[in-house]
Amino acid sequence: MALHPIITSLRHHKLTSLLLVLQVTLTAAIVCNVASLIATRMENVSVVTGVAESGLSTLSVNDVAPGVEPLSRHTQDLALLQAIPGVQAVAAVRGSLPLNQNDWSSVGCDSKADQERERQLHSDKAPGCSRVSIYHGGPGELTVLGLKLVEGRDFQPSEYVRPGPNDMGPVPAAVISHSLAERLYPGQDALGKDVFVNDKTIPIVGIVETLVRPSLGEPATDGSSMLYPVISDKASVLYLLRSDPKDQARVLRDAQAVLMKAEPQRIIQDAQSYTELRHAYFQRDYTMIGLLLASALGLLTVTVIGIAGLAGFWVQQRTRQIGIRRAVGATRRDILRHFLLENFLIVGTGMVLGLGLAIGLNMLLVRSYGVAPLPVLYLPVTALLLVTLGQLAVLNPALHASRIPPATATRNL
Amino acid sequence: MFSYYLRLALRSMGRTPVITALMVIAIGLGIGASMTMITVLHVMSGDPLPGRSGTIFYPHLDPLPRDEPGDDAADDFTWPDAQALLEHAPAVHQAAMSGGSLLVRPERKDLPPFYADGRYTTPDFFVMFGVPLLEGSAWSAADEAARARVVVLSRSFADKLFGSAPAVGRTVRFGDTDFRVIGIVSDWQPRPMFYTGYSYSMFSGPDGFFLPLHTAVELKSGVNGDTDCWGNANMDAMHTDPACTWLQVWAELDTPAQVAAYGQFLHDYSADQLKAGRFQRPPAKARLDGLMPWLRAKRLVPEDVQLQLWLALGFLAVCLTNIVCLLLAKFLRRRGEISVRRALGARRRDIFLQFCVEAALIGFSGGLLGLGLAQLGLWAVRQRPDSYAHLASMDVPLLLGTLGLAVGASLLAGIVPAWRASGEAPAAQLKAE
């Protein structure tokens, strides 16, 4: 089928056609970038923490009664929590958890020499060194968190230290994440070797598969973390509880009740499931995903409405011409094809311009907002999507047009 | 004439209800989305002290060592520098301040202990910022110097502690120290809370209490927000260490001469400190920022929100293009009607006006819909846990602005179609039929 009659008819509607092309261009450019933004956010929220999240609950407790001795208080609390029906495991940690934004971080190195070099460079990018988040926790932390040991062992009871008022003193053992092991000792087995943090030399006794940091943001070091065997002696403590997920709400209620009963002069915060904690951490991402999805759908809807509305109008306006074409021998399929092809031309032109604009827009976004560059695959996918939607939008008016009888040509409208 | 055009427009909209509805929905969606984001941006970048912000200034010194990484890490003040400014710098009013969370032990047995956020500051804070004092008074310079255990509470904080009973004269226990309540202020909350200094808390709730800065320093009360120390700073005496910044200083300067004098003082002070060997960076690093320029430089609007605004505006652009298309189609379809009206003596102007009225009417309806959608959008924003979320609501200018934007946008969209339609020759279409 020749394009000639289509182009001629479009020339009669120059302004309207151009506007429609413009609309498709803008839609394509925005939708393409929005899709890429959604993908980035989805990647953020689907991060694997290494923690067995289902069934884990947390309670942050701050004792404010004067003269309470924290260590014995915590021991007593842990016994009370363990006694709650349905509680499978408990542990007391100082305050940091993956994704709870309470980050206690330092720089870990594979040798004193590298550590010295790192100090001079003023950068944790020095080879053999990595920024690392340190989780200070008491006995049972690995079990409660459900961390997966891939090498070595959990801490032994004798290894737990009680920090002094100013400094922790020597730390006899550390369990590190696999990702940290790879950064410190690339291509080697880190188990049994040492990690150097500040003035401490700590033997690595275990390696867990995954353990992310309390705050994410630097892809290279997001997985660099390690555990110290520390019994918290501070007035504020974070209790971890593991239970069956369906008992979780009750267990949390009971836990708050027994803790308050044991000591009314305390403040309990963040009594929540780990799922809630995780959701709170990614709140902004979820908001953005929702907003981006809504605006992409809204845009596509408006554009489809525009295409369908305009096509309907054109069919009505050209009823007479269509009748004439039918009368001089055009088949119904020819008419249908005419409108589909016309739409394809408009949407296709808008598409080509739109993809160019999408790349430009993306470059702007990369520069001013640091978003990820647009994956090339998104361009053909968006193109296919918009062309399909355009064809679908025009289908009904086009079918309507193809049903116009040839006799219309002879009628006076 | 206008009412006649309005009637014509209504009749024409009634004739093509679907296409009219589509246009109203399109403009409503575009306006709703963009106004939601414009409102959020508006509340985040507004003037926190209308009428006063022009005379409020934030001084800046740079006490950092020369080789400390980071060009200008210290936005805050050390205790010795803040004291020097308070004592010697020529300002109408000035105050040093810092935030703190203190443990409150209520007298009421039914109220468990809790942490409250408030401010440690010097007496001029209240006069300078115009904090509305409801009862009692603020503390005097003598109270400040004497490190008096006195406190000014916010209305809702006092109500929480004492119910409806008078609070002035009562005692509040912060940590292990008793403070006498000497005044009550309204729940004063400038938007943003510029004086907190550190940007992530500028959209948080109002301060519950205010107490003398010297008292807080003497008690070594904990400080909220950025505390930067360098070199061999003594963390135990962080409050008074000359190598720890943790204070904000604001000054009221009413005339350009006062501003110049204060700026000169900052420069001279820096030069003196450099000579004395305490400062290492050149005195040119000292400066004085007006409140609004300082806020703008802080870039309080999160990137997420900016991105959302651009998205919403792009959305509006597509909706407008869509409306131009549909209006063009709709208006040109009425050639017959136009021809008849032209043949009966209507001028081009009349036709143009008629179609503009119709476009404006569509815009107005779309604006109403958009207003509803924007309220829905703002409600959704308020449900978010972000610190700025609770501020998201429209004021009257924004309400009118929304309708204005909708009508303006659709008029803009209607101009080309209306012009094209009015250009029809009177007889052409009549002949064709």
Image (tube, coloured by chain):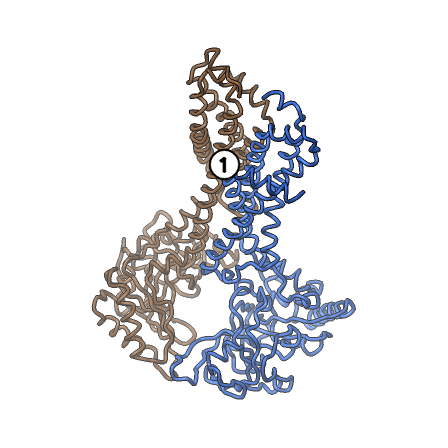
Chain colours: A brown, B blue
Q: Which sits in the foreground, A268 or B325?
A: B325
Vertical arrangement, residue A60 with respect to residue A313, above or below: below
Vertical order, B84 against A55 (above or below) = below
Q: Is residue A309 left or right of residue B296?
A: left
Q: Classify A334 as above or below A290.
A: above
Callout 1 secondary element: helix
The amino acid pointed to by label 1 is: Thr
At x 45%, y 61%, the residue is: B385
Residue, disc 1? A303
Percent x, y for residue B400? Answer: 61, 54
| Mark 1 surroundings within 10 Å by alpha-carbon count, few (fewer than 14), some (14 through 19), many (20 or more) | many
Query: Quadrant location of the N terminus of chain B?
Result: top right
On the image, which quarter does residue B211 sit in?
A: bottom right
Residue lying farthest right? B257
Q: Could you tell me how many numbered marks the image carries?
A: 1
Query: Is residue A1 visible in this depiction of the protein?
Result: no
Residue in the picture at 32% in, 77% down: A260
B355 or B304, which is in the foreground?
Answer: B355
Estimate the x, y position of residue A268 in percent, counting from the top left.
36, 72
Q: Chain of mark 1?
A: A
- Res. B6 visible in picture: yes
Location of the C terminus of chain B by quadrant is top right
- Left or right: residue A234 versus residue B7 is left
Indicate the position of residue B279 as horizontal and vertical percent values: 66, 69
- Relative horizontal placement of residue A67, taking residue B359 as reference (left or right): left
